[in-house]
Amino acid sequence: MLKGLALTPPVIGRISIGKVVEKDGRRLPEKDDGFTITSQVQGRDGWINHPLDEVLRKTPGAKLRSIPVRLLFDDPELSLRANYSLFDRKTGRPLCVGNGETCRRSTPEGIQHLPCPAPEGCELARGGQCKPCGRLNVRIDHAAAGDELGSFLFRTTGFNSIRTLSARLRYFHAVSGGLLSTLPLELRLRGKSTTQSHRAPIYYVDLTVREGMSLAEAGNAARAEQDARKASGFDQAALDEAARQGFAQGAFEESEEDGVAVVEEFYPDSTGVGSFKRPSGTDEKMDLATKLKQKSQVPQSV
């Protein structure tokens, strides 16, 4: 087995609430008020829709605002991983991942474990280069989805989505007795307005029990499904442990190849994807790799 390679859940498609569009010669992210389910293949106009995208829409062209899902794992932290993430905007290479206390950082001397002061207290995070990043793997609960161990990946840098999904997963884990993987759930798009959004609606992702079911009914269905799985020899605890070990193998979840798409969609700046926005009033010429190298030469207190 290759060392240093994170073994992440197999992904057969993506779930997004936006897309990347070209404006004035630059590719920039554009938010949407509905879900889009895509394959992992890109065409000239962006990601190609997955066949399930059309199947789940009630009428052709209708907004998709809910998706029936199940989770792969019982452990909430395996289904949703959230951390502060810093990428090299020129290459898409992951550079640093932290949780507000500690971080794993790529340096010329290799991966180092360092204190993480969170973006607002980190010199390398200036200019919005480091953001909270959430990654949620779900199975779309539809016969056309096929692969029972294949998942659809929803990525977000939205604080509302990360906080809501984190809370929901922990609550469902508690009330179901830990049977997250068998609960019939639903991804749901919600909107809210804030002063920061100038009263315009912003959209985030929530996780609820399936439409038309009460929490008690969903719990009963989860226990029945759990009993059926046990009778067939399905070992959920072993699956969770395999996933836990797979994540632990690598310092970063995204590869450099994945990072290019992540940077383009979630880490743009005013100068365009692939370049850095310099702070006003400075003649600094160093790129991020140089800053990291200099930073690694300064003694760090762990």
Image (cartoon, rainbow, N blue to C red):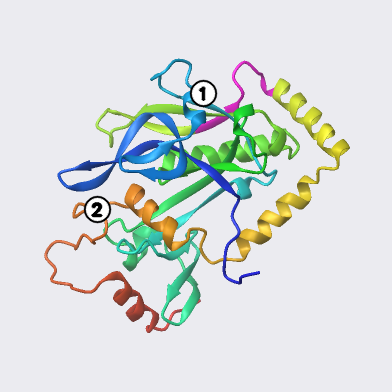
Residue 196 on image: x %, y %: 28, 37
262, above or below 229, in the image:
below
- Of 29 and 214, which appears nearest the observer? 29
Q: Which mark is residue 56?
A: 1
- SS label for mark 1: helix
Q: Taking 210 as reference, is 279 left or right?
A: left
Q: Is residue 128 visible?
A: yes
- Amino acid at pointer 2: Asp
- Mark positioned earlier in the residue sequence (1 or 2): 1
Residue occupying the far front of the picture: 44
Whether 194 is among the magenta residues is no
Label 2: element kind: loop
Side of 84 where 12 appears, left or right: right
Q: Crowdedness of circle 2 by 10 Å Cα count: few (<14), some, many (20+)?
A: some
Quarter of the image that includes the N terminus: bottom right
- Tell which tag, 1 or 2, sits nearer the viewer: 1
- Who is closer to the viewer here, 152 or 159? 152
Name the residue rendered at 61%, 72% in the picture. Answer: 3
Region in magenta: 206-215
Taking the magenta stretch, the answer to whether it contains residue 213 is yes
Residue 15 sits above or below residue 246 on the image: above
Q: Which mark is residue 13?
A: none
Identity of the amino acid at label 1?
Answer: Leu
Question: Residue 89 location, x and y as percent?
Answer: 31, 61
Could you say where residue 106 lies in the image, as x and y percent from the top left?
A: 44, 72
Q: Which residue is mark 2?
A: 269
Within-10-Å neighbours for mark 1: few <14, some 14–19, many 20+: some
Residue 203 against residue 40 in the figure, above or below: above
Cα distance between the residues tagged 1 and 2: 34 Å
Residue at the spot 81% in from the left edge and 28% down from the top edge = 224
